[in-house]
Image (cartoon, grey):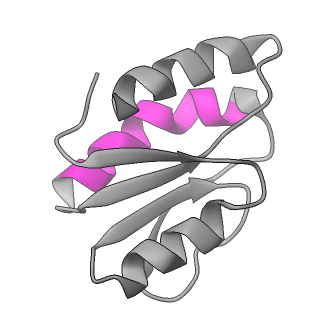
Amino acid sequence: YQPSCRVELAAAGTAAATAARLAAEGGSVGLLATSEPPPNVAGLGRFDHAGELAAQLYAALREGEEAGLDVIVVEAVPEVGVGRAVMDRLRRASA
């Protein structure tokens, strides 16, 4: 599944800052990360580990797409266990 809006991967711990920067540049931005979204960024979900991200990934991407967002920033997870599959899906969505 590749949403019509851009998907940008951000390194762990940098997703909120990346989303804030993109929003300041004038885009409508959503965030799916381990942290709360900054002001002017739509929260699409929060997760604590790769399994939680896997469970909500497609719903969050669809939600962002339906909201007409320009970009969805997703925080990368370690590529261990289910994290490997999640990162593969995210790379495909961001291609």
Q: Position of residue 37 (x, y in %)?
A: 58, 74
Task: Locate residue 66 relative to residue 26 in the image: left or right.
Answer: left
Residue at 56 percent across and 67 percent down: it is 18
Tell me the residue at 72%/26% (across/down). Answer: 51
Q: Main secondary structure of the magenta part?
A: helix
Image side of residue 39 versus residue 3, left or right: right
Residue 63 part of the magenta-drawn span: yes
> In the rendered structure, does residue 23 fall within the stretch colored magenta?
no
In this image, 20 relative to 26: left or right? right
Viewer-proximal residue, 49 or 8?
8
Which region is colored magenta? 52-65
Quarter the N terminus occupies: top left
Percent coordinates x, y for residue 84 in the rendering = 69, 14
Residue 86 x, y percent position in the rendering = 60, 21
Q: Residue at x 49, y 78 (%)?
A: 21
Instruction: Indicate the position of residue 55 as horizontal and vertical percent values.
Output: 58, 29
